[in-house]
Amino acid sequence: MAFLPNIHLLGMFIMLTTITFRVKALISIYTYVFLEFFVQGLLWWLPNLYTWLILWGITMLLPKKMPIWAKSIIYPIVCALHGFAYGILYAPSQALLFGLDYNGMIAWIITGLPYDIIHGISNFVAGFLVLPLSLFLDKAIKKYK
């Protein structure tokens, strides 16, 4: 989906694997991040060392025993908030890599706001897949254990 700016399923997959596999989800997250380094290089790799960790950490903090109705609301919201905040989370590494001062970093964030809005909205929509896919994965794991 690289042809669509900031529209992807990665946030949804990170939430899904974190809900299902908890700490072990870090294996898939950092496998992706390190593969991304080889494909896209340092500029994409450095910020993704911590941006996906933040989504993983927030997802880990969500209570496991939430009612289904609460999960169906909270999962898309968390996914969306990460998408809306992605440019802000990304900015410090870009400032470091490109030698931007504080004002330059703020300008970088403001310039990227339209993309963050697209990112947040698309993450919100993708976030609705987290609950049904997590229920499916739970059943499949129990069946094949």
Image (cartoon, rainbow, N blue to C red):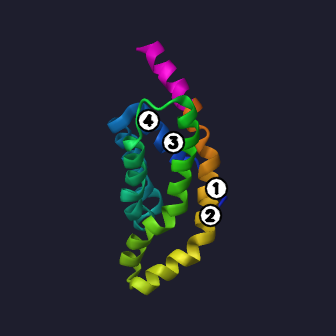
Local secondary structure at mark 3: helix
Pointer 4 local density, CA inside 10 Å: few below 14, some 14–19, many at least 20 = many
Tag in front: 3 or 2 = 2
Check disc 2 and give the amino acid type. Ile
Q: Residue 20: x and y, percent? A: 43, 31
Dot 3 corresponds to which residue?
13
> Relative to 142, is 50 on the left or the right?
left
The answer to which of marks 1 and 4 sits earlier in the sequence is 4
Dot 2 and dot 1 residues touching (CB under 8 Å): yes
Range shown magenta: 133-145
The answer to whether residue 1 shows anywhere in this view is no
User: Mark 3 and mark 2: span between their CA atoms?
Assistant: 20 Å
| Label disc, if present, on residue 121 of the rendered structure | 1
Taking 126 as reference, is 103 above or below it?
Answer: below
Q: Is mark 1 on a helix, strand or loop?
A: helix
Determine whether, in the image, residue 63 is placed left or right of residue 133.
left
Mark 1–mark 4 distance (CA, rounded to whole Å): 21 Å
What number is the disc on residue 19?
A: 4
Question: What residue sits right under mark 2 in the picture?
Answer: 117
Main SS, magenta residues: helix
Q: What residue type is labelled 4?
A: Ile
The residue depicted at 44 percent of the width and 35 percent of the height is 19
Vertical position of residue 73 compared to residue 64: above or below: below
Which disc number belongs to residue 143?
A: none
Q: Distance between the residues labelled 2 and 1?
A: 6 Å
Residue that appears at 64% across and 61% down = 118
Picture coordinates of residue 91 (x, y %)? 44, 72
The disc labelled 1 sits on which kind of residue? Ile
Secondary structure of the residue carrying numbered label 4? helix
Q: Mark 2 and mark 4: span between their CA atoms?
A: 25 Å
